[in-house]
Image: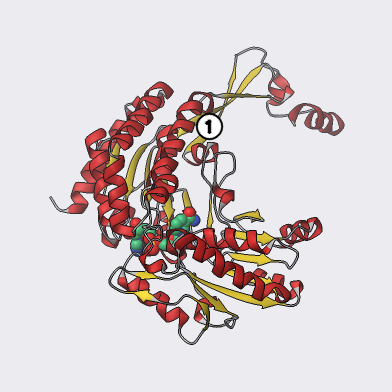
């Protein structure tokens, strides 16, 4: 049997499993989520080692942003899944009284999740937890660029669940394309905007509802009144964790010119205090995913003025935290998503010109602003668009379960995290139930009510 035949056969089994109705029970879903949690806890060390091998992730980062993150998602889903799955009573318009109107949450069906390599565990399993909580059969495709994590996750899921319920397909782009030739009930893709477009085109053939969690250049605006030391520490933290390979990392900084030099000095101090004088040797500093990515980043710094950093170690695939000064808006580093530890810092004189530049570019996944001034916080919130925003910090808008996470425009569509993730993988089915009496004759044609009465009924009883 070739791969695509194997996929078709497995797909039919997942469909049959879903149709059996097993996943409809919230109690069964809770059991599966708990099973997943236990399996992750039992293999914590293997997973941490795989994350270290593929991305040089320090233990703290591996736990807080990957393993612990997913365990929190599981706990949250277990706590709430019964309530989320309950049909919700809604008011019925008087014209149909007596009636019972319900909104019934139903699982989408068999869903596909495609994940990138930068947070290879979190970005595959966090949407998976949401899909399981919502009662779906789930197909998963991890990134091929982090093979140790991909194998460890595939082994964990295969040892814990039947592939009729949770199927993992490891492989390269061809595997993803073959998967997309099958019909799913929802596709959840995290990755680049270019591939996201292809995924959506493939989804259009059925058509399949699609969530796209994409990337882009997230700006960070710093006004001169900000606490520049704290701003620099929070920017450096958000930018250089996972060696800059974070979709919501601040991509570049726009700082009021009078504060530029002080901010750069504080960034240098922050980097030194986080990673020491030789970040390339620091065990708390991550590595780049592969040599091609390292070369792409090095090329982005070509011809630019380097404030600090810039050294690379091809052996360990590392690049120092690197700050560039005032690159031109049309240079490659200001055109493509950086997705690495290179931070352009541009001084500006006029906030209007900055907002104009930001707004004429593709809508970012995140926007960061550092200022104490309330009116500027409100103005910049009002005059820009982005997937999410943090004021006086970076990345924190995606923490926790209360706020939905997702992009807008070229940075994506659809959201997840907490209840928003459950909703993404749920179809809310409106159901109205009535009895046979009363059965008023005036609704049936030919309707002979005078126009004034018709309008009155429409206004009072139909809305
Ligand atoms: P990518 O788009 O290259 O790959 C993502 C996934 O798509 C992988 O599993 C890959 O195998 C698969 N894929 C590759 N080619 C495909 C094709 N032609 N058809 C279907 N699937 C295909 O992304 P990446 O390099 O792994 O990740 C980096 C990008 O992801 C960055 O742009 C980053 O901003 C973005 N990202 C976004 C988020 C978010 O939550 N919004 C999170 C992390 C990363």
Q: Is residue 201 left or right of residue 357?
A: left
Q: Is residue 49 visible?
A: yes
Question: Foreground: 294 or 36?
Answer: 294
Q: Residue at x 42, y 75 (%)?
A: 297
Colour scheme shown: secondary structure
Point out residue 24 in the picture as x, y percentages from the top left corner.
40, 26
Q: Residue furthest bottom?
A: 303
Q: Residue furthest left?
A: 1
Quarter of the figure that contains the C terminus: top right
Question: Foreground: 267 or 318?
Answer: 267
Q: Is residue 220 left or right of residue 47?
A: right
Q: Residue at x 64, y 18 (%)?
A: 99
Q: Is residue 299 left or right of residue 348?
A: left
Locate ligand 1 by image quadrant: bottom left
The residue wearing badge 1 is: 429
In this view, 227 is above or below 68: below
In this view, 321 is above or below 83: below
Task: Tell me where residue 16 sits by quadrant.
Answer: top left
Q: Residue furthest right?
A: 452
Point out residue 169 in the picture as x, y percentages from the top left corner.
26, 49
Task: Tell me where residue 316 sits by quadrant.
Answer: bottom left
Point out residue 395 in the picture as x, y percentages from the top left corner.
56, 54
In this view, 150 is above or below 227: above
Q: Is residue 361 visible?
A: no
- Answer few, some or many: residues within 10 Å of disc 1's Cα (few below 14, many 20 plus, some between 14 and 19): few
Q: Residue at x 32, y 47 (%)?
A: 48
Q: Is residue 42 left or right of residue 217?
A: left
Point out residue 184 in the picture as x, y percentages from the top left corner.
37, 45
Element assignment for label 1? strand
């Amino acid at each position: 049997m070739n791969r695509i035949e194997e996929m078709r056969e497995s797909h039919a089994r997942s469909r049959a499993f879903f149709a059996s109705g097993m996943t409809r029970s919230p109690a069964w879903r809770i059991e599966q989520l708990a099973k997943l949690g236990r399996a992750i806890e039992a293999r914590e060390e293997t997973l941490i080692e795989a994350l270290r091998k593929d991305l040089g992730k320090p233990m703290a980062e591996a736990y807080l942003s990957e393993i612990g993150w997913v365990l929190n998602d599981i706990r949250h889903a277990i706590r709430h899944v019964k309530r989320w799955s309950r049909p919700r009573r809604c008011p019925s318009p008087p014209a149909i009284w007596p009636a019972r109107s319900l909104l019934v949450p139903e699982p989408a069906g068999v869903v596909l999740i495609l994940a990138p390599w930068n947070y290879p565990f979190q970005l595959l399993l966090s949407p998976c937890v949401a899909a399981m909580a919502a009662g779906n059969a789930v197909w998963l495709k991890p990134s091929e660029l982090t093979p140790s994590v991909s194998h460890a996750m595939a082994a964990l899921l295969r040892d814990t669940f039947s592939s009729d319920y949770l199927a993992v397909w490891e492989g390269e782009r061809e595997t993803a394309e073959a998967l997309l030739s099958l019909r799913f009930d929802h596709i959840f893709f995290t990755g680049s905007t270019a591939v996201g477009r292809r995924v959506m085109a493939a989804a259009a053939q059925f058509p399949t509802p699609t969530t796209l969690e994409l990337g882009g250049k997230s700006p960070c605006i710093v006004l001169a009144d900000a606490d520049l030391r704290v701003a620099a520490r929070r920017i450096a933290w958000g930018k250089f964790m996972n060696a800059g390979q974070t979709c919501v990392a601040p991509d570049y900084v726009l700082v009021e010119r009078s504060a530029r030099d002080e901010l750069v000095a504080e960034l240098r101090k922050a980097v030194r205090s986080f990673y020491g004088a030789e970040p390339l040797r620091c065990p708390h500093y991550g590595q780049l995913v592969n040599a091609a990515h390292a070369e792409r980043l090095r090329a982005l710094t070509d011809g630019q003025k380097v404030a600090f950093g810039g050294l690379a170690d091809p052996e360990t695939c590392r690049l120092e935290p690197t700050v560039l000064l005032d690159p031109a808006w049309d240079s490659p580093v200001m055109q493509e998503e950086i997705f690495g530890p290179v931070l352009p810092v541009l001084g500006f004189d006029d906030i209007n010109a900055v907002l104009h530049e930001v707004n004429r570019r593709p809508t970012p996944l995140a926007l960061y602003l550092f200022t104490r001034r309330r009116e500027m916080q409100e103005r910049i919130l009002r005059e820009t668009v982005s997937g999410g925003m943090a004021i006086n910090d970076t990345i924190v808008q995606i923490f926790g379960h209360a706020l939905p996470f997702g992009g807008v425009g070229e940075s994506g569509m659809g959201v997840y995290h907490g209840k928003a993730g459950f909703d993404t993988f749920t179809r809310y089915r409106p159901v109205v139930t009535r009895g046979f009496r009363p059965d008023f004759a005036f609704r049936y044609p030919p309707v002979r009510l005078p126009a004034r009465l018709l309008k009155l009924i429409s206004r009072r009883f139909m809305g």
